[in-house]
Image (cartoon, grey):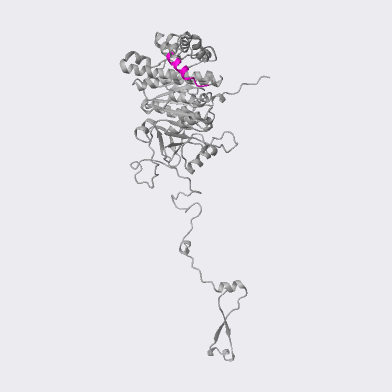
C-alpha cells in the first residue's frame, strides 16, 4: 500500500549461521507518483457512520418475517379527521385555520381539509364583517353561479328567502322550483308586472295609520320616482332636469290618488302629465301658459310614449298579473325571453324588476317577511346603457344591514365596471365592490389581480393565477379552477376552498345544459 514502509532483510557472512541470528533494516520507499506523495501526508480518516453501516440492510421489500407485511413500496397515507375524543391517542393532529364550520357548507380548506361554512348574517352578528354584501368574481365557467346557488340553497334551509330579481338567462328557474318557490316569467305572452305596484307593502298600507302609514307611503313614492327617472334616463340619453323630475313625482301622486287601488301604471302617469292639471302648471311655474308647459315636458312625454308604445310595449305598462309572496322560500323574476332584445330593453326590464322586488325588502323591514339573499347577476349589462344608472340602481338595491338583506354581485371581470359610460359611474361601481365585506374570487388572470379592491398576499395571487388556465388540450379534462374559491373578509388571510357538488346539484346548477342535447341527425 502506498505511503507505508517496507522492510528488507540483509545478510552477511555471519548470517549464514542460523544460530548467529539475523538483523533487518528499514529503508524509505521512494514514491512513484505525485499522488502517492500527497497521500503519504493525509491524516487517516475515520468513518462516523461505521457502526451504522455495519448493521444489516433490509431488502427492498422488507424483511421476510412472519406477518411482516412485505410490500414493494410505501403507499400514500389517507388523511382522516376527528375530534380528540374520537381519535384519542393518535398523534399528530392536523391544525385547523380557525375558520368556523357554522353556516352554509361551502367546501373544504385546500390546505387543512377543514370544512368551511359561510353565513353572512352570522358573520355580521359575530363581528367578522361590517355588512352583508358579497362580491363574487371569476372567469366564465368556473362556478360563480354554482357558488351563489349553493349559498342560496343553504340559507333557505336556515329560513332565509332566495330572491333573484332579474334572471336574464333563466338559469335559476330550475333551482327556485326545486326549492318550492315562485318563478314569475316576465315577457310578451307571459306574466306582466307593474313596476309602480307597491307589492307586499299594499297590504300594510291598508292596515296601518298615522305616521307609520305616511312613512310607508313616502318609501313607496321614493322608489317609484327613482324607477321612472331611471327609465327616462334610458330614453332621453341624459338625466332628467330638476323641473322634469319635479313634474314626474307630482304626476305619480295624482295618478296614485286617482287609481282605485292606489296602484298607478306608467300609462296613467303619462296621462296625468299630458292632461296638464293646475297642480302641474303651478309646479312648472308657467301659470296658465300650457304652451310653455308642453315645451318643458315635450321630451319627457315622448319618452313615456316610447315606454308605453315602444319596444317595452306589453311588458311594464299594465297592472301586475302575478304577485310576490313574502312567505315563499324562493322567488325569481325570469326575463330570459328578453335576452335577445337590445341592451336598452334588457336594462329597462332589469330596473323594473329591481324596483318591484325592492317592495319585498321594504315589507321585510316592516316586519312582514324574512331575511333575503338578493342575487344580482349580469347587472352590469343594464348599468352600462346609460350614464347615471349606477346611482339609480344603488338607490333601488342599496345594501342596508338593518333591512336583513344580503346582496350578491356576480361579475366576470373588473373590466365590466370599466365599460360603464362615465368616470363617475365607474367610481360608484368600484365603491359598491369595495363596500362588500365578503369577497369571493375564482380563477383570475394575473392582469386582473391588480385591479381588485382587496389586498392579496403573493401566495394568494399565485394561487388564483394557477386556477385560471386549463393547461391541457386533452378533451374531457376538468378545468383546474372549477369549484375552487378564495373567500376574503377584511385583511384576514383568505380561505381557499374546494366545493364539490352532489349529484342533484350537478343537474340543478348546470349552466351548459344547452350543449347537453345531442345534435340532430343531418339529412342529405
Residue lying at the far left in this picture: please name it: 210
**Which of the two residues, 63 or 355, is positioned nearer the viewer here?**
355
Quadrant for the N terminus in the image: bottom right
Asked if the magenta segment contains residue 244, the reply would be: yes
| Residue sticking out furthest to the bottom | 14
Image-based side of 167 in relation to 86, left or right: right
Quarter of the image with the C terminus in it: top right
Q: In this picture, which residue range is highlighted in magenta?
A: 238-250
Front-most of 496 and 260?
A: 260
Most common SS among magenta residues: helix
Asked if residue 407 is positioned above or below residue 454 in the image, the reply reads: above
The mark total stands at 0
Residue 309 image point, x, y percent: 53, 11
Residue 177 visible in this rendered orientation of the protein? no
Position of residue 7 relative to residue 282, above or below, is below
- x, y (%) of residue 283? 43, 14
Q: Could you tell me which residue is drawn at 55 percent across and 24 percent down? A: 514
**In the rendered view, would you say 324 is above or below 14?**
above
Q: Is residue 32 visible?
A: yes
Residue 459 located within the stretch drawn in magenta = no
Query: As rendered, which of 16 and 483 lies closer to the eye?
Result: 483
User: Where in the figure is residue 80, as x and y percent of width and height?
Assistant: 41, 41
Q: In the image, is 204 to the left or to the right of 338? A: left
Q: Position of residue 516 (x, y in %)?
A: 56, 25
Q: Nearer the viewer, residue 454 or 499?
A: 454
Amino acid at each position: 500500500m502506498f505511503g507505508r514502509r517496507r522492510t528488507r532483510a540483509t545478510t552477511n557472512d555471519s548470517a549464514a549461521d542460523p544460530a548467529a541470528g539475523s538483523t533487518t533494516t528499514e529503508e524509505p520507499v521512494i514514491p512513484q507518483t505525485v499522488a502517492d506523495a500527497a497521500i503519504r501526508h493525509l491524516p487517516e480518516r475515520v468513518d462516523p457512520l461505521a457502526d451504522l453501516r455495519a448493521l444489516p440492510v433490509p431488502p427492498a421489500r422488507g424483511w421476510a418475517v412472519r406477518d411482516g407485511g412485505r410490500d414493494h413500496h410505501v403507499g400514500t397515507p389517507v388523511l382522516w379527521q376527528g375530534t380528540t375524543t374520537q381519535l384519542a391517542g393518535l398523534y399528530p393532529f392536523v391544525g385547523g385555520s380557525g375558520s368556523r364550520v357554522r353556516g352554509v357548507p361551502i367546501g373544504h380548506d385546500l390546505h387543512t381539509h377543514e370544512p368551511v361554512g359561510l353565513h353572512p348574517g352570522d358573520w355580521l352578528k359575530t363581528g367578522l364583517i361590517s355588512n352583508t354584501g358579497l362580491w363574487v368574481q371569476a372567469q366564465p365557467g368556473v362556478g360563480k353561479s354554482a357558488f351563489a346557488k349553493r349559498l342560496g340553497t343553504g340559507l333557505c334551509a336556515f329560513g332565509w328567502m332566495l330572491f333573484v330579481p332579474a334572471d336574464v338567462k333563466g338559469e335559476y328557474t330550475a333551482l327556485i322550483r326545486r326549492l318550492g318557490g315562485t318563478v314569475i316569467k316576465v315577457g310578451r305572452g307571459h306574466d306582466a308586472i307593474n313596476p309602480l305596484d307597491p307589492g307586499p307593502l299594499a297590504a300594510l298600507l291598508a292596515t296601518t295609520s298615522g305616521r307609520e302609514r305616511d312613512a310607508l307611503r313616502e318609501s313607496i313614492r321614493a322608489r317609484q320616482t327613482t324607477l321612472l327617472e331611471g327609465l327616462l334616463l334610458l330614453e332621453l340619453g341624459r338625466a332628467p332636469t330638476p323641473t322634469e323630475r319635479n313634474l314626474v313625482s307630482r304626476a305619480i301622486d295624482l295618478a296614485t290618488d286617482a287609481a282605485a287601488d292606489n296602484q298607478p301604471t306608467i300609462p296613467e302617469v303619462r296621462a296625468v302629465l299630458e292632461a296638464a292639471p293646475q297642480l302641474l302648471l303651478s309646479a312648472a311655474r308657467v301659470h296658465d301658459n300650457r304652451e310653455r308647459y308642453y315645451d318643458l315636458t315635450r321630451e319627457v312625454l315622448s319618452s313615456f310614449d316610447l315606454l308605453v308604445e315602444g319596444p317595452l310595449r306589453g311588458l311594464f305598462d299594465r297592472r301586475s298579473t302575478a304577485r310576490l309572496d313574502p312567505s315563499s322560500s324562493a322567488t325569481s323574476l325570469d326575463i330570459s325571453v328578453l335576452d335577445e332584445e337590445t341592451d336598452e330593453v334588457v336594462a329597462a326590464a332589469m330596473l323594473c324588476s329591481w324596483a318591484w322586488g325592492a317592495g319585498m325588502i321594504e315589507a321585510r323591514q316592516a316586519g312582514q317577511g324574512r331575511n333575503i339573499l338578493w342575487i344580482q347577476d349580469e347587472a352590469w349589462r343594464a348599468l352600462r346603457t346609460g350614464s347615471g344608472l349606477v346611482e339609480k340602481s344603488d338607490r333601488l338595491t342599496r345594501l342596508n344591514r338593518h333591512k336583513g338583506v344580503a346582496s350578491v354581485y356576480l361579475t366576470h371581470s373588473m373590466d365590466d365596471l370599466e365599460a360603464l359610460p362615465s368616470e363617475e359611474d365607474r367610481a360608484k361601481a368600484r365603491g359598491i365592490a369595495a363596500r362588500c365585506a365578503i369577497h369571493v374570487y375564482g380563477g383570475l388572470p394575473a392582469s386582473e389581480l391588480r385591479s381588485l379592491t382587496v389586498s392579496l398576499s403573493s401566495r394568494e395571487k399565485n394561487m388564483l393565477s394557477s386556477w385560471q388556465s386549463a393547461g391541457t388540450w386533452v378533451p374531457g379534462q376538468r378545468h383546474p379552477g372549477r369549484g375552487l374559491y378564495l373567500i376574503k373578509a377584511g385583511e384576514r388571510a383568505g380561505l381557499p376552498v374546494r366545493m364539490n357538488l352532489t349529484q342533484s346539484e350537478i343537474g340543478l346548477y348546470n349552466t351548459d345544459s344547452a350543449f347537453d342535447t345531442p345534435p340532430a341527425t343531418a339529412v342529405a
